[in-house]
Amino acid sequence: MKENILIIVVFLARLPCFGLDIGGSLVKLVYFEPCNLQINRNGQDKVGLEAIQDFIKSNVNYGETGARDERLAMENVVLGGRKGHLHFIRFSTDVVGKFLLLAEELNASVLNDKVCATGGGAFKFEKDFKEILGVQLVKYDELECIIHGIHFINSSCVNECYYWNNLHCLEKSEKVPYNFDLNPYPYIVVNIGSGVSILFVESAEKFSRISGTSLGGGTFLGLCCLLTGCSSFDEALSMAEEGDSTKVDKLVRDIYGGDYSKFGLQGDTVASSFGKMCCEQNRSAVSKNDLARAMLITITNNIGSIARMCAVNHKVECVVFVGNFLRCNTIAMKLLAYAMDYWSKGTMKALFLTHEGYFGAVGALLELKTRMKSDKDCQITT
């Protein structure tokens, strides 16, 4: 009991709190805003606290790439014995320098001299955080943070987990809530960011990375930028929604004239991604939207194929897909759901989570409690 009180007191002394996941393409920031926060600070500190809270809550968009995902905000979350609200913010890793200058202008370093962080950027930008803000990044393992973040959010948010129904007609497919708490283990997590990592999860604390691929969200965006001239992920997705990939990809029916029934391959199955682009006449007939759609399907099919093989090898029925590649990306989610269901003959289920790519940042925030517990420099008075 005394130990728990100690953790809470130390934790409250460091509120408000931030968790950072600095990825290859995006920075994900989770901000915990305590309810009825009352902390005695000097004048300079008070300005810093108020300035940061006002800036975060009064804006939805920050510059050209930053955004606060209002739809994901969580109220009355209990963290470290304190109730508060979670805010979810993302921005391009390319503007970390500008982010640090803004944080310096808002006097952010008065709130915490240490910030829990994960992702490759926690190592890459560690020196910049120290030199510009005077803040130390306390680094934690990325995959461990993702798993801990998934379990915390799923247990704290109603209907966090869902699947897609009516997979025989994807246009009519809809989200259906799924109770992932009943008996989740073992399961597989497919984290789709710039690249892809696949984890085999046996329990809340026992998991391992079993596979992955370099062909992920960064590949989709990079190739779309080259092929279509788009400049953002949202723009690439918007183009893909309007495109027709059958003008780009060579299908089974293009080779066999119909289905390849002996092996259960339907005529509209992709036999060769971008296979029609070998012909100059076909190249002249496709639009940029068609190319974007084909690229999205190429990347998604590759991820789905690897995920299914991992599930078969580890005798797992549930595969959980997460990561910012899936943000507002219903095309990819439905394709993944259909592929898992079709090729497993209904024995495997593709699951998705509402908070998509923020689990690493949430996991980093959760690590704050552990760090506080061992912080010997903190003075406690009773």
Image (cartoon, grey):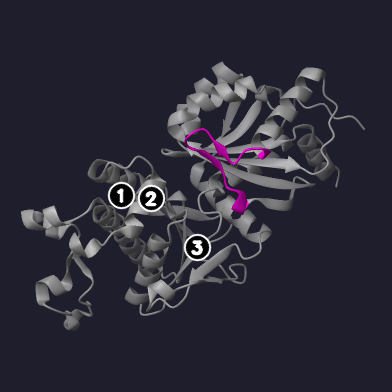
Cβ–Cβ below 8 Å for labels 2 and 1? yes
Q: Is residue 44 above or below residue 37?
A: above
Question: Dot 2 corresponds to which residue?
Answer: 196
Looking at the picture, tell me which residue is in the foreground, 239 or 22.
239
Question: Dot 3 corresponds to which residue?
Answer: 352
Q: Residue furthest bottom?
A: 261
Question: Which residue type does callout 2 highlight?
Answer: Val
Q: Secondary structure at mark 1?
A: loop
Q: Could one spot residue 111 in this view of the protein?
A: no
Q: Quadrant of residue 38?
A: top right
Measure the C-alpha gap from mark 2 to mark 1: 7 Å
Q: Secondary structure at mark 2?
A: strand
Q: Could one spot residue 297 in this view of the protein?
A: yes
Q: Is residue 263 above or below residue 228?
A: below
Which residue is depicted at the point 45% across and 73% down?
A: 173
Q: Specify few, some or many for label 1: CA neighbours under 10 Å numbering under 14, 14-19, or 20 or more.
A: some
Q: Magenta part of the protein: which range? A: 57-72
**Foreground disc of the pair 2, 3:** 3
Q: Residue furthest top?
A: 131
